[in-house]
């Protein structure tokens, strides 16, 4: 039984690492060095737990499933352009400080997707 849990964990890791492209169920069980029966059971179990999505697909003349993660791994790409990362007021910024993310023009512009000139001071009115 521990082997099955270990295989489920590895399978979820493989599926998550393939991201938006997903992974074919047949490729998954080959990568896990499992039988097709084990691979199918693992995929069904992960789908039942709500961790993956299975979509039927015709691949090279045979029906199979493409597996997609329901929860994507966290990525720094979403905040890499945040003005807070290189803000000169970072040390003085806080929720209840005079300089606050609540009133920061740069942060607000970044969230709304508006380009703002670099010469404006962050958080100061």
Image: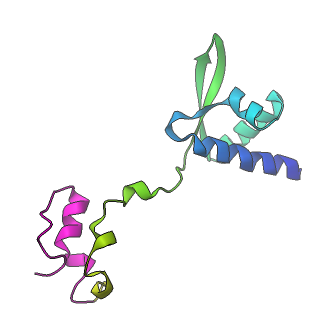
Rendered view: 102 above or below 37: below
| Residue 34 in view here | yes
Q: For the C terminus, give its image quadrant.
A: bottom left
Residue at left offset 14%, top offset 76%: 121
Question: Where's residue 44, x and y in %?
Answer: 71, 37
Q: Which residues are magenta?
A: 97-125
**For residue 81, side relative to residue 9 (left or right):** left
| Residue 40 in view here | no
Question: Where's residue 4, x and y in %?
Answer: 83, 46
Residue at left offset 59%, top offset 44%: 17
Question: Where's residue 3, x and y in %?
Answer: 86, 48
The outermost residue toward the top is 61
**For residue 14, side relative to residue 70 (left or right):** right
Residue at left offset 16%, top offset 71%: 105
Residue 4 vs residue 116, the one in the foreground = 116
* Colour mapping: rainbow
Total labels: the figure holds 0
Rendered view: 86 above or below 20: below
The outermost residue toward the right is 1
**For residue 105, side relative to residue 62 (left or right):** left
Q: Is residue 99 magenta?
A: yes
The quarter of the picture where residue 77 lies is bottom left
Which secondary structure type mostly characterizes the magenta part of the structure? loop
Rendered view: 85 above or below 80: below
**For residue 53, side relative to residue 11 (left or right):** left
Rendered view: 114 above or below 87: above
Residue at left offset 30%, top offset 81%: 90
The quarter of the picture where residue 52 lies is top right
Question: Where's residue 32, x and y in %?
Answer: 77, 38
The quarter of the picture where residue 85 lies is bottom left
Residue 65 vs residue 34, the one in the foreground = 34
């Amino acid at each position: 039984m521990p082997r099955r849990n270990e295989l489920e964990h590895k399978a979820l890791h493989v599926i998550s690492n393939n991201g938006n492209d997903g992974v074919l169920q047949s490729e998954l069980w080959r990568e896990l060095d499992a039988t097709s029966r084990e691979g199918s059971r693992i995929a069904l179990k992960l789908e039942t737990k709500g961790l993956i999505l299975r979509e039927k697909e015709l691949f090279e003349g045979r029906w199979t499933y493409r597996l997609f993660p329901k929860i994507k791994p966290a990525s720094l790409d979403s905040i890499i352009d945040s003005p807070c990362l290189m803000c000169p007021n970072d040390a003085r910024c806080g929720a209840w400080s005079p300089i606050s993310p609540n009133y920061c023009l740069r942060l607000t512009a970044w969230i709304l997707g508006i380009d703002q000139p670099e010469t404006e001071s962050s958080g100061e009115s």
